[in-house]
Image (tube, grey):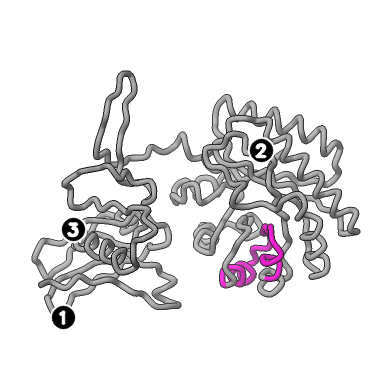
Amino acid sequence: MVRPFYAVKCNPDRALLGTLAALGCNFDCASRVEIECILSLGVAPERIVYANPCKAESHLKYAASVGVNLTTFDSKEELEKIRKCHPQCALLIRVKAPDDGGARCPLGPKYGALPEEVTPLLQAAKVGRLKVVGVSFHIGSGATHCRAYRGAIAAARTAFEAAARLGMPRMNVLNIGGGFTAGSQFDEAATAIKSALQAYFPNEQGLTIISEPGRFFAESAFTLATNIIGKRVRGEQREYWINDENENDFDRRSESNDSSIVPFFNNPTLSKDAAMGLVLSAASVRGWTTGSGMEGPPVPAGADEGSDTEKDSTLPWSFFTKSPRRRMRVAFTCNVCGQRTTRAINPHAYSDGTVFVPVILSP
């Protein structure tokens, strides 16, 4: 049996998370914010895997303080951080899958130890007296070639054997990652995984197999609404332009006169001052957002234009920000021009750090 750990990063909607928690699902968290979110639902920390091979030290310390004691690594530098901040944590060495299976979002270039790095990493963990309990891999999100799972599970078997040769305690966890798509592709993936497990982990006593499904749970339950700014028809093919994508994917050829659309060009010669100018000019437009959630609506929801009295909104502030981190609203009035401004900010920055808010002065 495979124990699912839902990948919170896929869709952090609290209704979805609460439903999964009530059904007994576990959770894959990649940051302190995600861990806090899951713990706030009453989920025990033992049901969380901190599945991020590159973590901030402050986040590691937080995980240690709340009892999240399972995480991943793929470098000696990460091992050193763990030894310093959370030495009692159980570890999964993340290995790079040999094949990404044609994934729509391949993760191999970003995470995972190469075959020649596995033994030195295990040896470093042993020297540092850190407890490696298993192996993790992720072939990528939305993979279409299920044969990739066989190669990844074979690589995991090799890592298990390397640990045994080093005389390390027997590993007992195998994390087969996520990216599964519901439907016939999932059935094919399940068949391929079952076959590979029988081939490389036959009759493995005490082995716990976990996974990190995200889209498998979320994609059929939600519909994405986005703003289409352009359309082109070429024969049977229809092409659409949207302005809610990552800034590097923004269509450069758009000639829209909508002043609320500010393209960010991938221009290496763009100076910091010019980039800040783009951000500040965009922030002055009513209702504009960077897509990262840095700005909320300049006039709070429910407030009358030109009124000094702010009305309560019936919508949550998260409705106006696309960032799961910037969940706090700060509203203030400029004592120079009298303009009322509202911004979405990170609550951790507000309570533990410093918040910088760009303000557009009226001429």
Considering only vertical position in the picture, is 243 above or below 239? Answer: below
Q: Secondary structure at mark 1?
A: loop
**What amino acid is labelled 1 in the image?**
Asn
* 135 in magenta: no
**What amino acid is labelled 3 in the image?**
Arg
Residue highlighted by disc 1: 335
Q: CA distance from mark 3 to mark 1?
A: 20 Å
Residue highlighted by disc 2: 99
Q: What residue lies at 54% left-to-right and 36% top-to-bottom?
A: 142
First in residue order: circle 3 vs circle 1: 3
* Res 238 label: none
- Residue 294 x, y percent position in the rendering: 33, 62
**What amino acid is labelled 2 in the image?**
Asp
Q: Residues within 10 Å of mark 2 (few under 14, many from 20)?
A: many
Report the quarter where the N terminus lies. Answer: top right
Considering only vertical position in the picture, is 214 above or below 43? Answer: above
Instruction: Tell me the magenta residue range.
Output: 58-80
First in residue order: circle 1 vs circle 2: 2
* 78 in magenta: yes
First in residue order: circle 2 vs circle 3: 2
Image quadrant of residue 300? bottom left
Q: What residue lies at 59% left-to-right and 71% top-to-bottom?
A: 57
